[in-house]
């Protein structure tokens, strides 16, 4: 597949996504979630099962950027942008009229932004500082052309992602394009499988310990990597006992016959020449 030869088509594909995204960001902005902009939150309970999609269609008629989530078979959680008192009264009356609302188990609250504007501005400043440092390092270490290409690649990815979110959230008014806490970070959900590595039992193998971690009876030894010290000590003790026993045998043989003792102490060397004869 000739990827390099068709690079102009890939450039056109990127521009087809980036240019509408830049226009959408410039004129419409982003659909900010309740974590960034704050807003109103309705925790509604019904006397009969109600689907969140039905409530979502009803909330879309008010044009308040509502997001409806299912909260059990007989409940929904609605989040909207900050509402005035008149809008709040109208929405609550409409929902009570068209759905079997249970007022005793329903609640309403105003939620402030959990992600402050100062945090967003500070993150943008850190990104700008990091980009400048990248340009300086690549210019010194390699070439300034490499630094420019790296920044362009970074901006390319940023504009594609933010442009898609702006188009989905503001042009098509989809909850998928809402910028909330999940846009910044991700938390594990209850439906994810547990970490199997945490449940795996440790396997015991006789391996050498690294330098500075040789533990013997609670004491730490520094030096070369050695196997188990207790087994090594026992081996040395057994070797010393064998050598002592051999020395005593040689002394006894020399006492009985000096020539026999010398013959036993002398190492046996078999010459291949003598064997051939």
Image: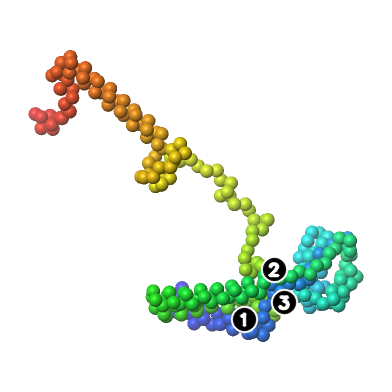
Outermost residue on the left side: it is 277
State which quarter of the image contains the C terminus: top left
**Rendering quarter of residue 159:** bottom right
Q: Which residue is mark 2?
A: 114
* Whole-percent x, y for residue 46 in the image: 86, 62
Vertical side of 224 occupied by 176: above or below: below
Front position among marks 2 and 3: 2
Per the image, label 3 sits on a secondary structure element best described as loop
Vertical side of 173 occupied by 114: above or below: above
Q: Nearer the viewer, residue 202 or 175?
A: 202
Q: Which mark is residue 21?
A: 1
Q: How crowded is the residue under tag 3: few (<14 C-alpha within 10 Å), some, or many (20+)?
A: some
**Rendering quarter of residue 214:** top left
Residue at the spot 63% in from the left edge and 63% down from the top edge: 186
Per the image, label 2 sits on a secondary structure element best described as loop
Tell whether 158 sits left or right of 210: right
Q: Which residue is mark 3?
A: 173
Outermost residue on the front side: it is 219
Residue at the spot 59% in from the left edge and 80% down from the top edge: 17
């Amino acid at each position: 597949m000739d990827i390099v030869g068709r690079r102009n088509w890939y450039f056109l594909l990127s521009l087809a996504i980036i240019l509408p995204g830049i226009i959408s960001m410039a004129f419409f902005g982003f659909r900010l979630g309740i974590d960034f902009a704050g807003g109103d939150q309705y925790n509604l309970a019904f006397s009969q099962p109600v689907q969140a999609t039905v409530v979502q269609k009803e909330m879309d008629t008010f044009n308040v950027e509502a997001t409806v989530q299912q909260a059990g078979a007989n409940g929904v959680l609605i989040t909207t942008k900050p509402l005035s008192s008149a809008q709040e009264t109208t929405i609550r009356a409409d929902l009570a009229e068209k759905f079997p609302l249970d007022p005793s188990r329903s609640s309403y609250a105003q939620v402030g932004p959990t992600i402050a504007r100062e945090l967003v501005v500070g993150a943008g400043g850190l990104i700008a500082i990091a980009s400048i440092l990248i340009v300086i390092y690549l210019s010194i270490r390699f070439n300034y052309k490499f630094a420019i290409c790296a920044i362009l690649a970074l901006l390319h990815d940023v504009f594609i992602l933010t442009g898609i979110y702006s188009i989905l959230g503001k042009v098509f008014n989809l909850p998928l394009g809402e910028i909330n806490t999940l846009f910044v970070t991700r938390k594990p959900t209850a439906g994810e499988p547990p970490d199997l590595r945490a449940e795996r039992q440790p396997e015991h193998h006789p391996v050498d310990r690294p330098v500075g971690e040789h533990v013997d009876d609670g004491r730490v030894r520094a030096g070369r990597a050695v196997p188990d010290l207790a087994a090594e000590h026992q081996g040395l003790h057994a070797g010393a006992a064998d050598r002592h026993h051999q020395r005593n045998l040689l002394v006894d043989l020399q006492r009985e016959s000096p020539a026999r003792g010398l013959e036993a102490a002398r190492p046996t060397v078999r010459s291949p020449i003598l064997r051939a004869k």
